[in-house]
Image (cartoon, rainbow, N blue to C red):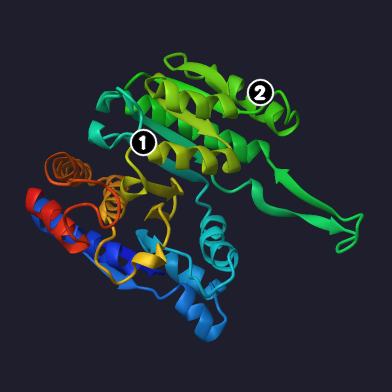
Amino acid sequence: MYKIAVLPGDGTGSEVVREGLKVLEAASRKYNFKSETKIFDFGGERYLKTGKTLDNSDIEELKKYSAIYLGAIGHPDVKPGILETGILLKLRFALDQYINLRPIKLYNADFCPLKDKKTEDVDFVVVRENSEGLYKGLGEFKNKGTKDEVAIQISHNTRKGVERCIRYAFEYTRKRNRKKKLTLCGKTNVLTFAWDLWERTFNEVAKEYPDITTDYAHVDATTMWFVKNPEWFDVIVTDNMFGDIITDLAAMIQGGMGIAAGGNINPSGVSMFEPIGGSAPKYTGKNVINPLAAICALGMMLENLKEDKAAKALEDAVIKVVKENLKSLAAGKMGYSTSEVGDLVVKYL
């Protein structure tokens, strides 16, 4: 029995989560496992009514669950940053979800914006450090509001935090067993303190993994190669900010935000899985948003729970839908409604 905490969140989050839970129910019947879900109302509407994002008691409650399934966070009537910091980042930090995992996989070459790229050319994974760096929230203003104002934002990196992320990436590369190649993505030529630590740690840990080929690419070069030669990559490990940036570009080359799923992973605790496209408020209630990213996030959750057969079958069903049914991965252009796409995945499952 898996206890799943469901956070539909804002905007279209409840619509895509609804389809994911439909698929979860079908998968549990077919693959003989049970799940119990509880809906939590954390998000913009709750904040507007109560002024609350997440309390410590909410965090303690979520620690009791097998996994967290998130729809989207972001409300047009709430100032940007409040919900993201008070819910998303607070969850990641409080639950020590120190890995952000982003599989990048092209299921239909027709939906790739890159010329002459085949499905096998876009198949890599980004392992992003998820709890440190610039997103730690450290910094200060000096002389705020004056002509001499200075804003300082600190990138906070610890040996422990960097090493556990890098070690996870090596283990993941070995388990993935594709090209067995791990690329460190950074900026060693300019950010000489943080990336000296990252590079030294990467090279030291690499000695323990002689079966893994390693290389390095500056973050700006990485974005260039994503567009020119995505087939070069297998697994990429990087810091919090760079990971946040490059995975949005990666989402585009895999077909768009409609198919982009991610996991916030605590390998020994509670992990959280989500579509990365945001709340898309302009599509709310129209039944046109693509639910496949949320469904793929559910597949990542099942894999994390060791329900590998169900996760594989779910991915195969998504591939079939993308290859055989959809005209586009964009909201309102799929040729099917949100609920119809969910029904197709259940059918093929």
Quick check: 15 left or right of 30?
A: right
Quick check: 131 left or right of 23?
A: right
Question: How busy is the neighbourhood of tag 2: few (under 14 within 10 Å), some, or many (20 plus)?
Answer: few
Q: Quadrant of residue 64?
A: bottom left
- Spot occupied by residue 321 in the image (x, y as percentages of width and height): 15, 45
For the point 39% across and 47% down, which residue is it?
262
- Spot occupied by residue 73 in the image (x, y as percentages of width and height): 46, 64
Figure check: 199 above or below 42 = above
Front residue of 48 and 337: 337
The residue carrying mark 2 is: 200
Front residue of 196 and 248: 248
Is any atom of residue 126 visible in this view?
Answer: yes
For the point 55% across and 78% down, which residue is it?
52
Q: Quadrant of residue 6?
A: bottom left
Front residue of 253 and 130: 253
Which amino acid lies under the numbered mark 1 shown in the image of this protein?
Ile
Figure check: 196 above or below 265 = above
Q: Residue furthest bottom?
A: 49
Figure check: 95 above or below 222 = below
Badge 1 or badge 2: first in the primary sequence: 1
Which amino acid lies under the numbered mark 2 shown in the image of this protein?
Arg
For the point 16% across and 39% down, which residue is it?
323
Question: How busy is the neighbourhood of tag 1: few (under 14 within 10 Å), some, or many (20 plus)?
Answer: many
